[in-house]
Image (spheres, grey):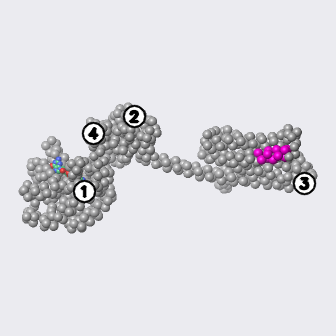
Amino acid sequence: MPAFAVILKRKELILMRHILRFLGFEHRSRHVKEYFFAENMKAAIYMSAVIIVLEAAMIIRRALIIVSRETYDKMPSYFMKYYLDPLLLIITASVMLAFSVRFMKGITRNKRIGTAMLLFFTFICLYFGIKVSVGDYRSGEQILTLMTMELFAVCLLNWQPFISIMILTASYLYMYHRMNGLIAPNTGGEGVTTAMKINLFTMWISMIMVCISNYNNTRSQAIKDERLENMNAYLSKLSLTDDLTGMHNMNYFHAEAKKVLDGTVKEPDEPVFLFMDIENFKSYNEKYGFHKGTELLKELAVLIEDIFNGSLTARYSDDHFVVLTSLESYRDKVKKLAKIVHDMQGDVQLSLKCGAYCPVKEDRDPDLACDRARFACNSIKKHYRETVRMYDEKLQSQFRQKQYIVNNIDLAIQSGYIKVYYQPVICVTDGCICGLEALARWEDPEYGLLPPSAFIDILEEYRQIYKLDKCIIEQVCRDHCAAAGRGMEFPPVSINLSRLDFELCDIVGFLCDMTGRYNISRNKLDIEITESALTNKQSQLQRSLADLRRNGFSIWLDDFGSGYSSLNVLKDFHFDVLKIDMKFLAGLGTNEKAGTILSTIITLTKQLNMYSLTEGVEHEEQFNYLSSLGCTKAQGYFFSKPVTLDDLNELISSGKLRLPAAAASQNA
Ligand code: C2E
Ligand code: MG
Ligand code: MG
């Protein structure tokens, strides 16, 4: 029983809450209140305009009657009787009209005055309506003026229902009271007739219904509008905020920086664009995990916003941040930040690098300004002592070269400026060539012979690298085919691919097409993937490598030992050949451990069923040492630098390099 009572109580409570909400007793958000107010202001414009026109027409009509009857002497009494009320109404409506127009135009925003005026206007309208209707009733006419004014004042204007009910009840009671004191025109008796009572009651109740319905319609519109506005605000915030750090993103930065470059915004006085990069962040991520890396980026974002407080700051991408600040104090701020970053490091040495660019007058493009600051930043990577680098003329000419590379890669490929140089790979046991590595060179008419260091990174940054790699693949296939055409044996060639090739094009499909078109056995092409490309576990890349292997290509791991997670890479992927980074061989003389590590890696390759290839052999002693360790293959300047195919043939025919006996006799 008590439970039933509780349920009943709860139901009653819910019903009560609904009724109260229906009557307008509820908390209304600021937006909803403003929506109602603006709707009322709009309605007030129509209402006051209509009232001004109607009342003006009444005044003119009366004036014409006076003129036609020539009753000028009665003017003073006529004024009190016929003109005072309409004039009062016109004045009130004009003030209301002026206020609501100013409000809609945004000239005034004072809602208190507005509400007071609406109430006053409503009162005047109803007073006028009752006064005229009482007069009409006395002379046997309908009481339509009251109805019209009520329609205006409580139906067109949107009051909370309980206010409308109060206004309507008060006005009808007053009307009833006034009519009750008169002789009913149709019966001749005193007081309001029963029929009229019923009429008044019906009018009262239907007006209340209209008010409630109007209010609730407008209310749901207001709520819908609010939700939409909130959603828009959320979306626009989202489009300007960096998801990870919560600071501004590049959309925002670009738009604001553009205003500075266009001169729309005068601050800062002498602007400077900064591009900041955390050196070794990748290693930090690898060592401490993705989550810690993200935490670090968030911390950095807060620090940057704090140190460059008042300046435009944003996250560019990854561990890169941009700032638009004033030239005056930027160096000290960057140094302060660099010190904090330095103190943050654990086992991984983190350092902040910053490039700065001062825009000149003609600069209008924030992207270009950021690019230049970034270029300056990249120029001091691995320069341990330097933290800040200003973009200057020297960098300007290098930057031009970078743009030249990006803009001319297509032309260079079409015009044959991209050439394959071959560097022999030597079999350690017999000293003969057992393979060639294809290395790209750009023979440019303007800049001369460009090494890969001048264009590979740039082409990767601008996601154009696949064009170059495809070009190299085709040239290698063509060289193979030409050799086969002359009945000669061509050693297998290893080709360097970028991680991006697998993203930007169907490189596996292309390799299959080319080997098919030039009729080359797939075991004549080996694919080199550099270790740094494989540091994150990427299932897509893993699938592509499996695809390569399925299609008959061997996969070589290049630059093994150059990163932090070399052993992880071996755990996650399978390779046919391990190319040991040249730093181990170079370190032999100076670092005692280098020899031990080298020998351990070579033993490991055997255990994992792989061949070992050591890069960077420059001296005979190094070669002999590798031979004593049981390394399978060797490559380096000691045998030959990368050379053109003609030069390679020359080296072979002069006897400086040797092909294996079988190939040599076939080629002879
Ligand atoms: P990598 O694949 O590790 O190539 C070996 C680099 O070491 C070559 O530099 C080669 O000239 C150099 N080298 C070989 N032996 C010695 C030596 O005894 N001592 C010294 N100090 N260096 C030696 P290169 O040709 O400048 O290429 C640099 C890098 O550019 C390559 O490193 C490779 O990662 C990339 N690369 C070259 N060609 C291509 C290409 O066609 N496509 C892609 N995606 N990358 C390429
Ligand atoms: Mg290589
Ligand atoms: Mg290498």
- Sequence order check, earlier mark of 2 and 3: 3
Q: Quadrant of residue 351?
A: top left
For disc 2, the neighbor class at 10 Å (few under 14, some 14 to 19, many from 20) is few
Q: Nearer the viewer, residue 82 or 39?
A: 82
Which residue is label 3 attached to? Answer: 186
Ligand 1: does it lie within 8 Å of the C-beta at label 1?
no
Tell me the CA gap for discs 2 and 3.
Answer: 89 Å
Q: Residue at x 29, y 38 (%)?
A: 393
Which residue is label 2 attached to? Answer: 270
- Left/right placement of residue 509 relative to residue 663 reads right
For disc 4, the neighbor class at 10 Å (few under 14, some 14 to 19, many from 20) is few
Which residue type does callout 4 highlight?
Lys
- Chain part drawn in magenta: 56-67
Which residue is label 4 attached to? Answer: 394
Tell me the CA gap for discs 1 and 4.
Answer: 29 Å
Q: Quadrant of the N terminus?
A: bottom right
Considering the numbered disc 1 on the image, is that residue within a helix, a strand or a loop?
loop
Tell me the CA gap for discs 4 and 3.
Answer: 106 Å
Q: Are marks 4 and 3 in contact (CB under 8 Å)?
A: no
Considering the numbered disc 3 on the image, is that residue within a helix, a strand or a loop?
loop
Q: Quadrant of the C terminus?
A: bottom left
